[in-house]
Amino acid sequence: MAITVSRPKLNWSERLYLPAIVAGMVITLKHFKNMLFGRTKVTMQYPEEKWDSQLPEHYRGAPALVRDESGRIRCVACQLCEFICPPRAIKIIPGEIPSGDRFAKVEKFPNEFDIDMIRCIYCGLCEEVCPEQAIYLRKDYAITGFTRADMVHDKSKLLEIGGVMQGVVLKWNEKK
Amino acid sequence: MPSFLFWIFAAVMLGFGAAVVLNRNPIASALSLVISFLGLSALFMSLDAFFIGIIQILVYTGAVMVLFLFIIMLLDLRTETRRKMNVVAVVGGAMVALAFFAQICSVVGQLGAAQQSFPPLASPKMDDVHSVGLLLFSNYNVPFQIIGVLVLVATVGVVVLSKRELR
Amino acid sequence: MDYVFLISSFIKIVALFAVVLGIVNYTVYAERRISALIQDRLGPNRVGPAGLLQPIADALKFLAKEDLTPGHVNKFYYWLAPCLAMIPAITTLAVIPFGSTLFGVPMVIADINVGVLFVFAIASLSVYGIVIAGWSSNSKYPFLGGVRSTSQMISYELSLGLAVIPIFLLLGQLRLTEVVRYQIEHGWMIAPFVGDWANPHKWLLAIPMMISFVVFTIAIFAETNRLPFDLPEAETELVGGYHTEYGSMKFALFFLGEYVAMITGSAIIVTLFLGGWHFPWIPDGSQGWGWGLVNIFVFFSKVVVLLCVFIWVRWTLPRFRYDQLMRLGWVFFFEIALANIFLVAIILAYFPS
């Protein structure tokens, strides 16, 4: 059944449109004024203003390798992270530590450790799976580059982001 | 106005006037007519008749030709440009036009007034808008009023017709 | 020939052209900033301090872009249309008195005795650019834009012309410098408190002048294809209207043409209704060249204020429907303007000053 929608009868001043137009213009003027005097909240001006200090504790940024207090790369090239990485962003070529070395007991170290940051999805599985607590997700999020090759973080870059991890982090302690 | 400007504008006017006839594309014809009108109004202005010149642009170029263009644009132009030239018609038309032109030339050549040269026009005491207005409202007051009423009736009629609701 | 006249005219033309193009560029910038502020955004603020170099960047972008001509267009007219869109808008500026005098030279390029008719005549030519653009693009949305624009401009030219007749009934002159001179002596057309404010005749006349002003301003909105009357280019329905098929500098010419037309329109409104270059207590250029410059500055300030109003209206009002637009033009403004003429004639005949 067709329903006839009755249109409201407009009175004289409403049909003149002018009061409505003026009311609309007052509203836009109010917005303009508030914005001009900075009374409206606006989007953050990104490169100048950053939100780094407010990043939450559990923020997952770029993955990075860490050294221990004595300067050794914690990674022992077990390749667990390489296997678990869902987008297969990690590539490790293990190497052997020569027998005369101070850390010869560890036997293996990563000869090359590349993370393709175009592929990385910041899931944090590598950090979770690492038995040596060698890879961590840091708070860096602005990862840029001009070429695809720029976007692959190699070992030195990862160590630079990671820095030194002080003390023994027993991340499974609370799960015991 | 220097005479070379007169020749330029006269040439523009005549050239584009010929283009109106010669162009196969109706849009091109209409636009040629527009430019021809512009040349005509420039000639009026060279005679210090600013009012007539401007009205020429305002009415013919700005309103009438726009409506022409409007209508032409809504037509299908392909048939017009694709049509074959009829040789007999072209030759006949050209001959008629030439005969007419020759006749005008002969008449003007024999006219006494066309041979003598006139002194330059004295510059008028008041501007042409005033003289046109004075003439219209003194010598031709009644016809002017009648035409005014006629135009007003036409506009009112259009408004009434367009205001009527369709049932 | 008079060489002083030639040289001074040349300088005036070049200077006015430069000033107007400068204002055009920064109107585009102001449009973007003001619209952003109205919508609680910030707008372009990256290029240069507060984004002030944005117009230059835009211009460079337009110039550097590939100048593409689509295959299905009518080449000659396709190239002709952007020029036709730009020329009439700029030509109109020739008769507008943009200042008093500077070193004794009147600040108007051509002070012809049919000033306002000249403005209307040239403004009526600006429809050709749009129509030809719409037709030559050979595609349906531009064509619809062209058709709409033709009928819109013809309709609103009528109320535009009728709205200024009251002024010329009052003055008995078509010369724009005379309009300004009258307003200096008797106060602005719509602001009778300037000048001899105690004169009741002036207050009586201000009523029809106000009506004229409103009708004229709205008609100028329609003539320059600005919102709420931007039906020829309505992005949401016609993609881009008559300039859908245009790109790079040819599009920029349409764009600039629209803004120049806006400036011209504001300049005419200022000259006819808002006292031109006059401002109370500021002497004219005969008191020294400094005051002459101040007069020019006053004129362009008024124009800029009106441009801001144009922008403000654009980002406030929604677009009219096409039949509403035609109705408004023919049934509403046309009659108001016509009745207004009678009103002024009656006032002038029965209540002489």
Image (tube, coloured by chain):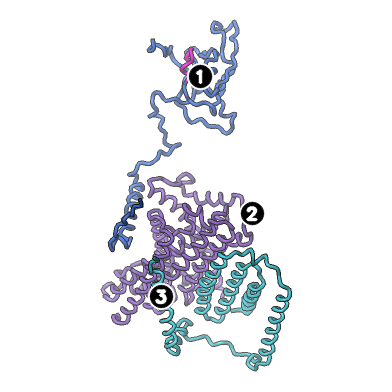
Chain colours: A blue, B cyan, C purple
Q: Residue furthest bottom?
A: B112
Q: Where is residue A149 in the image (x, y as percent from the top left)?
A: 59, 29
Range of magenta residues = A125-133
- Residue B157 numbered mark, or none: 3
Q: Mark 1 lies on which chain?
A: A
Q: Which amino acid does label 1 sit on?
A: Leu
Quadrant of the frame with the N terminus of chain C: bottom right
Name the residue: 66% across, 68% down.
Answer: B24
**Relative vertical location of residue C345 with respect to residue A51 in this rendering, above or below:** below
In the image, C188 versus C297, the foreground residue is C188
Of the residues tagged 1 and 3, which is closer to the observer? 3
Q: Residue at x 55, y 22 (%)?
A: A88
Count residues near mark 3 (Cα–Cα under 10 Å), then give few for <14, some for 14-19, many for 20+.
few
Which amino acid type corresponds to the residue marked 3 in the rendered image?
Gly
Q: Where is residue A17 in the image (x, y as percent from the top left)?
A: 33, 60
Measure how far apart labels 1 and 3 are at the Cα level. Answer: 87 Å
**How many neighbours does mark 2 have within 10 angstroms: few (below 14), some (14-19), or many (20 or more)?**
few
Which residue is label 2 attached to? C71
Secondary structure of the residue carrying numbered label 2? loop
Q: Residue A65 carries which label?
A: 1
Label 1 sits on a secondary structure element that is strand
Distance of label 1 from label 2 (alpha carbons): 57 Å
In this picture, is C103 found above or below A109? below
Q: SS of the residue at dot 3?
A: helix
As displayed, is residue A137 above or below residue A168? below
Rendered residue at 54%/12% (across/down): A78
Query: Residue C227, labelled with which disc?
Result: none
Residue C290 visible in the snapshot: no
The image quadrant of residue A82 is top right
Judge by depth and name the residue closer to the eye, C29 or C318.
C318
Residue drawn at x 38%, y 55% as measured from the top left? C317
